[in-house]
Image: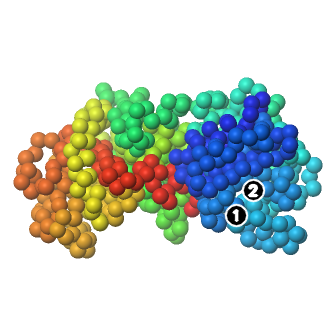
Amino acid sequence: MCGIVGYVGPRQASEILINGLSRLEYRGYDSAGLATLGPSGLEVRKFAGRVSVLRDSVTDSAVAGTCGVAHTRWATHGPPNQTNAHPHTDCSGGVAVVHNGIIENADMLRRLLSSERHCFRSDTDTEVLAHLVERSSATSLEGRVIDALSDVEGTLGVAVVDSTDPDKIVVARRGSPVLLGIGDDEYFVASDVGALLGHTRSVVYLSDGDIAVLTRSGYRIMDRWEQEQVRPVDTIEWDLETMALGGHAHFMHKEIHEQQHSVANALRGRLLPDEGRARLNGLNLDAEDVAGIKRVVLLGCGTSFHAGLVGRHLIEHLAGIPVDVDIASEFRTRRRLPMSGALTVAISQSGETADTLEGLKAARSAGAHVVGLVNVVGSTIARETDGGIYLHAGPEIGVASTKAFTSQVVALTLLALHLGRHTGLSVEDGRAVAKSLAALPELIEECMTVERQVRRVAEDCASAQTALFLGRGISVPVALEGALKLKEVSYIHAEGYPAAEMKHGPIALIEKGTPVIVLAPKDDVFTKTVSNMQEVKARGGRLIVVTTDGHDELDELADELIRVPASSPLLSPVLTVIPLQLLAYHTALLRGCDVDRPRNLAKSVTVE
Ligand code: F6R
């Protein structure tokens, strides 16, 4: 979603700002803009469309300046056009504001400010901030920003510059991430570490309520009473290379192929194969805490929710603890019942998903112990939880989540093993799980050999109106994930369903040639799944079956048989999902879709 970049230092700001925005493009946006402070005052440039349009417009000397802020916007209030793009300015044109989040009382403030003769130009909620800063009588920019924010309700990450207080950026955080980059005599602002790569590895994550003031000579952080706050300086783990295509045509393709490494990273240092257990120190749960867990609640959205559905099977099977899995937005709006004794796990690649964040807060206020399963280090969910497991999958740039899913399933298996060894799972059974986990990276590599076959299958799927994905047991979430991947990147209508449930409705969708993709790894529901395949076949559906090596009974039945290496049935989702990711990718390519940036979607969904 929206992205913020800011710079103050000795170098020309516009180039740094635009390069930073380019690295945030993956988050999804519809317009881009910047404001620089130079010898001739404040200069604003903004456009609907890609960052490249903005880049082409900043070649003249009017945008010269060594301090500035920039933004990519994902429209919420008002259509995605030039006027609504950020930065927004006050009546004098001297104050420029970029903002992520939503100002909930914007309509009321707009009426009030209009009645005081402030002149609005855009439809956005953000513009009220620029006029509120203008209206304040405080003497410094930080004082005026603090005044402005005291009138505002909602979530925000903001960066503000003012031509009357030059060479200064004031930044504030309330619910929407902002971090500072610390360079040599230069300072950066960003909503995402990606924008800072190549400039500095030293960052300061602002906490909610923080206001930061950046100048060429340093930075300071304070609260709204201007009391100094001390925040640690952290080091970014990612580097520029991890954000490059590395020879692949698209990030989605790169990230599918990275999975043997991302899964190995999720396991690194955490498996104790001889002892048959997992070491998860970051969870901050000792034996006594685990003994007090009466149930586990897994929260997430989209792909992360699907990983949670796999997690239910894993935790119930290995640890014998009952598990609820909820879509975070639904969880938080239901009646809140007491949750003492519930371990709540917030699952999120980005760590910024607003629904998941609100879900974890709701769980905590109901008495749950809350941990995170997050990829992005230092993200809001990682910081809001009492402990957690980082995925260490590296940046996921493609909007469709791929490598995060397999890492989430692996991290949930580690969690299940950890809990299980405290709740009665034997050393021997623990060793078997550890062995299966350790074998995964190699099996994932083998799995990639299906790509040529999947590309052929994609040729049939590309002209389909609809596709069904079916599975049973632990394969149901994989079916849901396969359908989500196909619909979001290829725009083909797709449904994921439990195979047995198909006959209660969706079977009506099947006609001659409808692609029906069935997940059928060899497990204890295999035979029943084969019966469901017969039902599909009898209705003329085109049967594409993903199964495990070494079973010939499907040769006759399936129109297309995609074999993945055999693994422990509990871990089959990590392997069976790979052909589905590749199918979505190749189908989308054949249909000419923008696979890395599907329409209407954003990588990090920071609005509820
Ligand atoms: C689908 C996809 C989304 C995300 C969802 C949650 O490919 O990417 O469904 O999984 O928006 O995002 P995170 O995991 O960042 O909380």
Q: Residue at x 19, y 70 (%)?
A: 511
Residue 178 point in image, percent of width and height: 67, 45
Q: Is residue 10 visible?
A: yes
Q: Position of residue 290 (x, y in %)?
A: 44, 44
Tell me residue 301's x, y (percent). Answer: 46, 57
141 relative position to 182: left or right: right
Q: Would residue 14 appear left or right of 594 to someone viewing this image?
A: right
Kindly indicate whether the residue at mark 2 contacts the one at mark 1 (C-beta within 8 angstroms): yes
**Residue 460 spot, x, y in % from top left:** 23, 56
Check disc 1 and report its element: helix, strand or loop: loop
Three-letter code for the amino acid on which mark 1 is drawn: Thr
The residue closer to the viewer here, 23 or 443, is 23
- Number of labels in the image equals 2
Asked if residue 260 is positioned above or below residue 401 in the image, the reply reads above
Q: Residue at x 53, y 41 (%)?
A: 376
Q: Which residue is mark 2?
A: 88
Q: Label 1: which residue?
A: 124
Q: Identify the secondary structure beneath mark 2.
A: strand
Of the 4 image quadrants, the one containing the C terminus is bottom right
The answer to which of marks 1 and 2 sits earlier in the sequence is: 2
Categorize mark 2 by other alpha carbons within 10 Å: few (<14), some (14-19), many (20+): many
